[in-house]
Image (cartoon, rainbow, N blue to C red):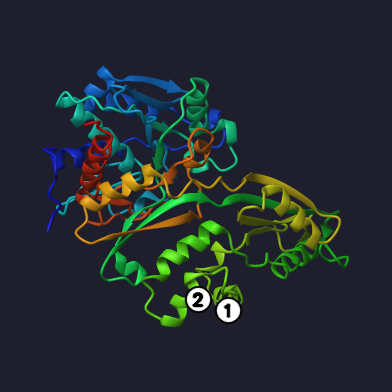
Amino acid sequence: MGYTMKYPIDKKMVAEHLAGMCKFPTRTHRLEEMIDFKPFDDMHEYMKEIYPLIHEKLEWEIVGRDALLYHWKGTGKSDKLPLLFMAHQDVVPEGDPAAWKYPPYAGTIDENGRIWGRGAGDSKGNIVPEMEAVEYLLSIGYTPDVDIYLGYGYNEEVGSGLKEKSAACMIMRTLEKRGVRLEGVLDEGGGVQKGENFGIDSANVATIGICEKGYADFEIIRKDAGGHSSAPEPNGALTYVANAILGIENNPYPLRLIPAVAEKFRVLSQFMSDPEQKRIFSDLEKNWAEAEPIIAKDRKLRPYFHTTMAISMARGSAQANVLPEYASVTVNCRILAPDTVDSVREHIKSVIPEGMEIELQKGCDPSEISVWDSEFRRNVMEVAQTFDPKPIIPVPDMVVGGTDAKYFNTISENVYRFIGFAAVGESGGAHVVDEYMDTDKVASACDFFIDLIKKYEVK
Ligand SMILES: [Zn+2]
């Protein structure tokens, strides 16, 4: 059964708009001078065509090289601070186009109403419902009682560690300079999921990202004289690397509990079927001695409880009969607060052989943690609930990947990684071949944003 829209918006048109957005190969790069901005500029022209009222009636501007910031001035009747809805324009590379069922930038809509293409889910599928909602409300002559901002950066996918060079950070600084503080921010990284995924039949689960782990890639390097492999010396460059790997693997960060994670499992525990598990996870702090061995054995649970260090790349010489002059291993770290990029570097230094260099390739510290019990969060949940036949359980979450949201804690306490797609239809993952989005899903989010804006009406 398809999703029936609450507001008179043509679902087919929404699908066509998303498909159209997917036609622009808005690939990004860590170095701004390496980004081809033509597809971004072309996409902006397309957005002007499909959202004419937004571009006519809202203040809008380009921030940095090509980020978009829209401002819809409210009546001022509401004493609430403005809301910001976010997403990002850039996409990850498509990989081998031949591996795709439909070409990655064709914007194909199949007979089942699935929109296929790079960016369909991550995150043009968020831009479209946010703009569709505003365009619809403008078309009926509506003015919100609260100010609404829409903000779309262009380097989220390479954003970890870009700091001030992140387009999202530039948007935040633009608002900060104008003295804008925000009632709430919504960005990618969470949403309503079917309860079955959590072993819950009677309800669906809303994961709401209130914080994200930090990130760092360290290359650990040993330089050596090299030479012909027929006359090797012991303890060559790769032996150093091997010892560094062992040092890291044998000295993992101990498991520990942070309050945001304790709260997540407290909420989830109410729905666990195993009574023993339910008891332990309902209060991880109190039951830590019992919980720790359970967590230690579970690959999916462990990342929530410590900084991880994954050995992911290694380099030796380019040929079998040449000794390496440069050997290295790259360690990908996901950092749990209060650890930092610097403290992880010190930890790695302390467990690898002397005489090696550590180079930080990119990194950013863990985000701040948003307030959980806020009026904005409750409003978001109340609106999401109206689109779901089952009760929704809101669960605070720590996002293990990175998002643009982290920059906004400077101007808001209520920054949530949550987009209000109802638990209908499917979306085919992020960063994968055959990325897609169901029309029903993206359509449901249009209704969600309309009602969230209307929630701030002063009666
Ligand atoms: Zn994304």
Q: Name the residue under label 1.
A: 290
Badge 1 element: helix
Q: Which of 103 and 57 is in front in this view?
A: 57
Pointer 2 and pointer 1: residues touching (CB < 8 Å)?
A: yes
State whether residue 192 appears in this view.
Answer: yes
Residue at the location (22% across, 22% down)?
53
Q: Sort mark 2 into few (<14), some (14-19) or many (20+) by Cα contacts within 10 Å.
A: many
Above or below, 163 relative to 96: above
- State how many labels appear: 2
Above or below, 69 relative to 441: above
Badge 2 element: helix
Which quadrant would the C terminus be assigned to in this image?
top left
- Within the image, what quadrant is residue 42 found in? top left
Residue type highlighted by circle 2:
Ile
Indicate which disc, 2 or 1, sits on the residue closer to the N terminus: 2
State whether residue 64 appears in this view.
Answer: no
Residue 219 lies left or right of residue 47; in this view the side is right
Residue at the location (46% across, 29% down)?
181
- Find residue 176 and report its horizontal and vertical position in percent: 51, 25
Which quadrant would the N terminus be assigned to in this image?
bottom left
Distance between the alpha carbons at the discs numbered 2 and 1:
7 Å
Q: Sort mark 1 into few (<14), some (14-19) or many (20+) by Cα contacts within 10 Å.
A: few
Label of residue 280 in the image: 2
Residue at the location (34% across, 72% down)?
199
- Find residue 346 and report its horizontal and vertical position in percent: 77, 53
Residue type highlighted by circle 1:
Glu
